Image: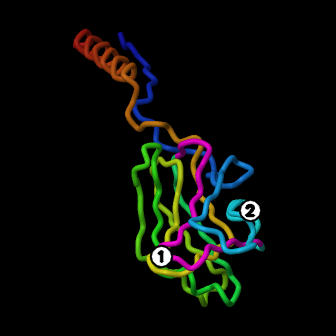
């Protein structure tokens, strides 16, 4: 007599998330701050309005920065920054760092010593492979200059699990399944 036992269980599901969305975008609940604001320049919200024709600028200062804060903690996959593309400002975004912070204000990812080639057709920098949880990101110059930018984008996978560790009930079900399989195997001998 042949017996079949079919068990269907998921031990650890590999990520197959939806397309990432820009969690820094104003319409997605993001907010923006600058270390300072140059004169009558537009407000920091222009960093996250989705419009590459607007720009913001800080005053000349040491370690000028722009920061975006998300409305929640997200699994950040990549970020893009667009410096002001006008001839006067293209070279101002050289030698800068990127930092991703968690809810405890700890740096969970960073990239330092970055520069953007000013002769590129579209002046931007993309940081891929971040793949960690955070709730705000900062771009900071590593010298004295004013920071002039058009847009600051941070993309996250909204379907990312909060943990890659299976629930305790998964271990219980796994143990039961192995016990049943072992018992059936012994009976079949």
Q: Which residue is at 29% across, 12% downward?
A: 184
In whole angstroms, how far apart are the C-alphas of marks 1 and 2? Answer: 28 Å
Q: Residues within 10 Å of mark 2 (few under 14, many from 20)?
A: some
Please give the residue where the numbered disc 2 appears in the rendered image: 50
Q: Position of residue 70 (x, y in %)?
A: 60, 48
Residue 41 in the figure: left or right of residue 131: right
Q: Which residue is at 70% across, 48% downward?
A: 28
Residue 146 is tagged as none
Please give the residue where the numbered disc 1 appears in the rendered image: 62
Q: Quadrant of residue 33?
A: bottom right
Q: Nearer the viewer, residue 157 or 79?
A: 79
Q: Residues within 10 Å of mark 1 (few under 14, many from 20)?
A: some
The segment highlighted magenta reads 54-74
Compared with residue 110, is residue 178 higher up or lower down, i.e. above or below? above
**From this viewpoint, which residue is outermost toward the front?**
39
Q: Position of residue 34 (x, y in %)?
A: 60, 64
In the rendered image, residue 94 lying in the magenta stretch gets the answer no
Compared with residue 171, is residue 104 higher up or lower down, i.e. above or below? below
Q: Quadrant of residue 85?
A: bottom right
- SS class, disc 1: strand
The N terminus sits in image quarter = top left
- SS class, disc 2: loop
Q: Which residue is at 58% across, 87% downward?
A: 91
The C terminus sits in image quarter = top left
């Amino acid at each position: 007599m042949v017996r079949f036992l079919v068990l269907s269980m998921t031990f650890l599901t590999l990520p197959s998330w939806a397309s990432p969305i820009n969690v820094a975008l104003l319409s997605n609940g993001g907010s923006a701050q600058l270390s300072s604001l140059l004169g009558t320049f537009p407000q920091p919200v222009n960093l996250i309005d989705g419009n590459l024709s607007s720009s913001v600028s800080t005053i000349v200062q040491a370690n000028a920065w722009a920061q975006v804060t998300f409305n929640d903690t997200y699994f950040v996959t990549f970020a893009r920054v667009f410096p002001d593309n006008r001839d006067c400002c293209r070279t101002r975004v050289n030698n800068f760092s990127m930092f991703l912070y968690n809810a405890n204000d700890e740096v969970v990812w960073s990239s330092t010593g970055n520069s953007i080639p000013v002769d590129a057709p579209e002046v931007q920098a993309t940081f891929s492979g971040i793949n960690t949880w955070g709730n705000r990101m900062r771009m900071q110059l590593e010298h004295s200059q004013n920071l002039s930018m058009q847009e600051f984008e941070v993309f996250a996978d909204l379907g990312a699990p909060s943990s890659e560790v299976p629930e305790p009930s998964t271990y219980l079900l796994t143990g039961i399944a192995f016990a049943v399989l072992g018992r059936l195997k012994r009976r079949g001998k």
